[in-house]
Image: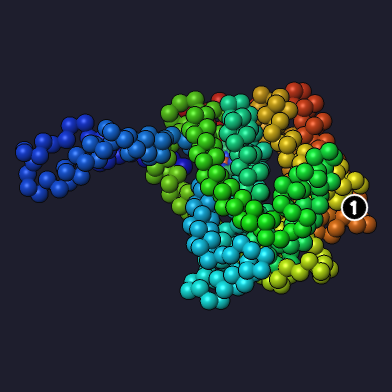
Amino acid sequence: MKAVPGYERETRIFLPMTAKNPTPPERALPEQTDRNAGQGLASWLDQRLPLISFMRAEYIDFRLPRNLNWLWNFGAILSVVLVLMLATGVFLAMNYTPTSTGAFASVEAIDRQLAGGWLLRAMHMTGANLFLAALYIHLFRGLYYGSYKNPREILWLTGLLLLLMIMATAFAGYILPWGQMSYWGADVITRAVGAVPFLGASLEHVLTGSDHLGDIFLHRFFVLHFVMAFLVVGVVGLHVLALHISGSNNPLGIEPKSRADTLPFHPYYTTKDLVGLLVFAMIFAALMFFWPGLLTEPDNYLPADPLHTPAEIQPEWYFLPFYGLLQSVPSKSGGLFAAAASLLVLFALPWLDRSPVRSMRFRPLCRAGVLGVAVAFTALALAGKHHAEGGWLVVGRLAALYYFGYFLVLLPLVSRREKTRPLPASITAAQGEPS
Ligand code: HEM
């Protein structure tokens, strides 16, 4: 992406936001009065509550590396989908009944009787699936380009906190329609939590609130789902704050050396993000309108029945890798520990990887290693889907060994000694222009 010469100067001339010298109203020409009154009000407001200056400094003029690729679209995509989830969620909640006798019927009524209800629900369900998909891509981008490294550790840790919170929100949300999968998925997980040594029974009781999955449980998860979704917004604020302190990483993993290595957010990345959002919106609409069955489980259109276990109990696709881990380890509490450890190990990543080079583009060995992590994660999901039986049990175990082996053995050992490819002198130099 090339800078338009003189562009920034022009922006300052055409968008004088804080207007240090507004025309005094008594001297303004009649046709100028309205425009200047607008500026005056903006400047008056901005001096008291500098939201406009903040937006200008942190978004419009905020400078980012000039070489960000399409993978850097996902932060904006996640932010927009989060807003969509909150907006549709609030309207769904107005029509939802959080009781074991009323939940299923209220969701059916939203789908069939409420005007536009089917669209609200379709957007919320498609949004949940694509949110998790975007989250995994966003996380993997960070793994591949070393965005977890100094000075972006807090950015990485707040991102992981978001991942845990969103997983909890998605799990709680899936329980709410109180269909067969909601009920039996919750049954598997609460029992697994009950198997945690020492604390299990108390934790299970905190979740269920009684000796069975019923009204108290459903009510708790409704509140959890709702509250967590809003807490996520607060943590996103911290995440973006941390991003604006360290600045964005980029595919080369080197810091910008001069102004020429960067571009202002507007118009370069506003347009790039808009294109990304448009493509994402098309995939969203295609899934929602043409292939809704891809993302839904038919069993969840049957009301929860504690007396009838479905032939197959399976979590949503985004939990399958963890389900695969749970099943690949012989003991129940061991499986739970492995599933939790697979996420916790990511929190230690900034300190496990000791290489001074960030981007895997220059680290051939670790590049193969991290691509292997993506393959292992997919293999665990497939093992989970096939209930880790027969050959899939072997696949699940090998994938689990590789996953932990990469983070806990390969990365710490290799990262100090690996032979890296030479880094370019600057971002502009790498693009073949003088820096
Ligand atoms: C609600 C969920 C999330 C939202 C709304 C969000 C939002 C954003 C935004 C807007 C950016 C800047 C644009 C970009 O780089 O794509 C960003 C960057 C980043 N996020 Fe997230 N994020 C979320 C979750 C996560 C998760 C789960 C992780 C992984 C641990 C993560 C790690 C990062 C990192 C490392 C960066 C900086 C990347 C770089 O500059 O190379 N985020 N995020």
Q: Position of residue 21 (x, y in %)?
A: 17, 32
Q: Is residue 301 left or right of residue 24?
A: right
Judging from the image, what secondary structure is the residue with disc 1 in? helix
Give neighbour class at mark 1: few <14, some 14-19, many 20+ (Cα, 10 Å).
many
Residue where numbered disc 1 is placed: 393
Q: Nearer the viewer, residue 235 or 138?
A: 235
Q: Nearer the viewer, residue 329 or 257?
A: 329
Residue 286 lies, with reference to residue 89, above or below; the image says below
Give the residue type at disc 1. Answer: Leu
Residue 82: in sight, yes or no?
Answer: yes
Q: Position of residue 183 (x, y in %)?
A: 74, 62
Residue at 37% of width from left, 39% of height from top? 55
Residue at 69% of width from left, 56% of height from top? 217
Residue at 34% of width from left, 38% of height from top? 51
Q: Is residue 428 left or right of residue 401?
A: left
- Residue 402 location, quadrant: top right
Residue 168 lies, with reference to residue 413, above or below; the image says below
Residue 336 lies, with reference to residue 106, above or below; the image says above
The quarter of the image that holds ligand 1 is top right
Residue that lies at the very extreme toward the right in this rendered image: 390
Q: Position of residue 306 (x, y in %)?
A: 78, 66
Q: Nearer the viewer, residue 173 or 357?
A: 173
Q: Is residue 297 left or right of residue 313?
A: left
